[in-house]
Image: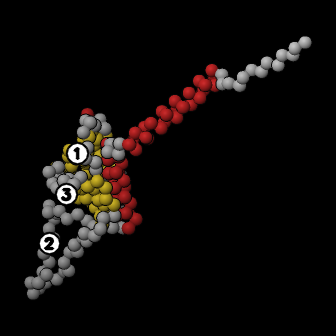
């Protein structure tokens, strides 16, 4: 009598196991692809909005914590945004009233000029981003080369709004709430303020 070797089924994956693994891979890819895309395309509109938000948050935080005025300096030509110490000097600010002594000489000390100092934070917007408009204290500063926004030690700021355009047609409006100096933004051009 010839003995047959016992039949052993081969080890393999079932169709259900393979489908479960494919579903898990699909879920992981759905979560990972947007972040990979943002890493590969650093010039995106979202990065520009985040950079501006970070600069504004930093200026507000330094102003409140240090008890001094901070400036958000926007250089239109260079598309550079910096946070600096000191109050912005504007030509439309109210001139100081004269206060002469009896002999006719100015008796008060001269106003302190804010130090230019090194910036606390600087970021440059990508070449694919264009600043379409800047409004500061209800005036249009779009054509100005440098615009400075004040953040005060009490947690308030100047009225400010900025409009960005991406070369792919994407638009954003970024503005500051005056009473809290917090950043907000809108992506729907029909809702721009």
Q: Residue 181 or 133: which is nearer the viewer?
A: 133
Label 2 environment density (alpha carbons within 10 Å; few <14, some 14–19, many ≥20): few
Residue, x 20% and y 53% (percent of image)?
76
Q: CA distance from mark 2 to mark 1?
A: 41 Å
Return the disc, 3 or 1, that comes first in the chain's sequence.
1
The quarter holding residue 89 reads bottom left
Residue, x 26% and y 55% (percent of image)?
80
In this rendering, is residue 22 above or below 173?
above
Left or right side of 115 for 20: right
Image x and y of residue 69, in percent: 30, 65
Callout count: 3
Secondary element under disc 1, as helix, strand or loop, is strand
Return the disc, 3 or 2, that comes first in the chain's sequence.
2
Q: Which residue is mark 3?
A: 146
The answer to whether the residue labelled 3 contacts the one labelled 2, judged by CB atoms less than 8 Å apart, is no
Left or right side of 19 for 67: left
């Amino acid at each position: 009598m010839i003995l047959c070797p016992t039949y052993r089924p081969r080890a393999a994956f079932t169709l259900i196991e393979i489908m479960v693994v494919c579903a898990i891979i699909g879920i992981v890819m759905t979560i990972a692809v947007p972040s990979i895309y943002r890493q590969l395309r650093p010039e995106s509109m979202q990065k520009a909005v985040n950079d501006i938000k970070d600069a504004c948050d930093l200026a507000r935080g330094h102003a409140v914590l240090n008890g001094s005025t901070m400036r958000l300096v926007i250089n239109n030509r260079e598309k550079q945004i910096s946070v600096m110490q000191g109050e912005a000097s504007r030509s439309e600010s109210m001139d100081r009233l004269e206060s002469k002594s009896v002999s006719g000489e100015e008796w008060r000390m001269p106003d302190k000029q804010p130090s230019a100092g090194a910036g606390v934070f600087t970021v440059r917007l990508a070449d694919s981003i264009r600043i379409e408009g800047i409004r500061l204290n209800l005036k249009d500063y779009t054509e100005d080369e440098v615009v400075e926004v004040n953040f005060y030690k009490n947690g308030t700021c100047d009225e400010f709004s900025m409009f960005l355009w991406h070369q792919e047609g994407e638009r954003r409006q970024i503005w500051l709430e005056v009473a809290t100096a917090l950043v907000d933004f809108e992506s729907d051009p029909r809702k721009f303020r």
